[in-house]
Amino acid sequence: MKRVIIYSIYLLATTACSGQSTSSTVKPGTYRAVLKTKGGDLPFGLDIQPTAGSSKTYTVFALNGNERLPMDPATVQGDSIRIPMALFESELIAKIEDNTLRGVWRRRRTAQQYQTLPFEAQHGQNYRFVKEAKGTAANLAGKWATDFGSKTGKVDTVNAVGVFNQKGNQVTGTFLTPTGDYRYLDGNVVGDSLFLSCFDGSHLFLFKAKHDPATKMLTGGFWEGVSGYESWVARFDPKAELPDPAKLTFLKPGSKTLNVSFPEPNGKVVSLADPRFKNKVTIVQILGSWCPNCMDETNFLSPWYKRNKQRGVEVLGLAFERSPEMAESGPKIERMKQRFKIDYPVVLAGTNDKAQASKALPDLNAVVAFPTTIIIDKKGQVRSIHTGFSGPGTGNYYDQYVDEFNRLIDKLLAEKI
């Protein structure tokens, strides 16, 4: 790891100094990118194109399954390219070598500490783990009752549900959990083995498993980020389900609403008692700018609010960030608002430690997950609390959530005060 960090520092220094020389040109198109993790190569796709009207920047998308996730504008200095993802304080920095990009991914953890991994990308390649099918692949499409961290090698507790689609040897899907999902996973089945991965600037997921057709079981490992690892097992089960997300977070006895009062980045204090929320159906979004599942929910909620705010609805975002200091977290909230074009207020409510977040919202039994969505009726009473969020990577589960959300809002808007 020391060698990776030293190489990262060297690359940054080289990039900063190389501005004096003629800049290299990045070949536009699709790249097969790889991060070198403890679990092996973690592949993902990149689409890099010159930005229209600019000779100095590039438009970049991370490719995972059906998702084309926009990164921030990439810049070239000398012989290196920098692809930032400011929302997650991470970036790819690489030297341009004809058809190859070679460098590091790094993510800021504290003011002086970064996590780093070696990175490289090959132009013109778009396969995930293998170029083509070799032999007959196992059919893993469907639902899988999953136990992350199983101690017995059996599914003793269903703490996730795998949902996979398969075409030939190509597999897409995700794992749903009581607190959210693993977003867009993409991979292959090779013989009796499953390989899945995801990179979105924040999440680095690598799954490997062996399939036993006799027991209809998957047994494997899950590598997350720079050093995270967990074993997992899964059993094919078309009826696999998770606990009801409407029952995990609830009001304490005697509470009927939320009593919140927190500042926006501009210093203005926002309270649910403000006239803005009076006699309106209000959605309270517990989130964090660091949280990709919150990103998925915000990507739904922000345009939804624009279409529906004239109907008598409001939204308030409660951001729980890594730092309680507004000087540190305020700019992150503002970047999030700009990226998702958020029109509703987002306040700094505290830190993303769940115990501390629970103290900041004493009317709740606990803050179980980021995001959590609380819906309040026109009288100011809480009518629904939904823990977690099933994003678009979950397919029908996302569609079902959107339908149920809209039906509830319609019902509450029709009620008389």
Image (cartoon, grey):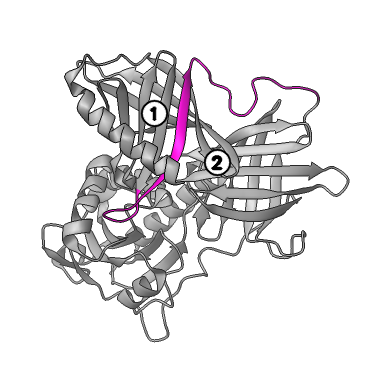
Above or below residue 146? Residue 249 is below
Between 266 and 187, the one lying in front of the other is 187
x and y percentages locating residue 315 in the rendered image: 27, 57
**Residue furthest right in the image:** 214
Residue interval drawn in magenta: 108-135
Is 120 included in the stretch rendered in magenta?
yes
Between 84 and 169, the one lying in front of the other is 84
Local crowd at mark 1 within 10 Å, few (<14), some, or many (≥20)? many
x and y percentages locating residue 244 in the rendered image: 57, 64
Between 62 and 407, the one lying in front of the other is 62
| Alpha-carbon span between mark 1 and mark 2 | 21 Å
Q: Main secondary structure of the magenta part?
A: loop
Q: Secondary structure at mark 1?
A: strand
Residue 171 visible in this rendered orientation of the protein = no
Residue drawn at (22%, 42%), measured in percent from left and top? 338
The quadrant in which residue 136 appears is top right
x and y percentages locating residue 62 in the rendered image: 42, 31
Q: Secondary structure at mark 2?
A: loop
x and y percentages locating residue 253 in the rendered image: 42, 85
Residue drawn at (38%, 64%), measured in percent from left and top? 374
Is 133 included in the stretch rendered in magenta?
yes
Q: Which dot, 1 or 2, sits closer to the camera?
A: 1
Residue that badge 2 annotates: 395
Residue that badge 1 annotates: 61
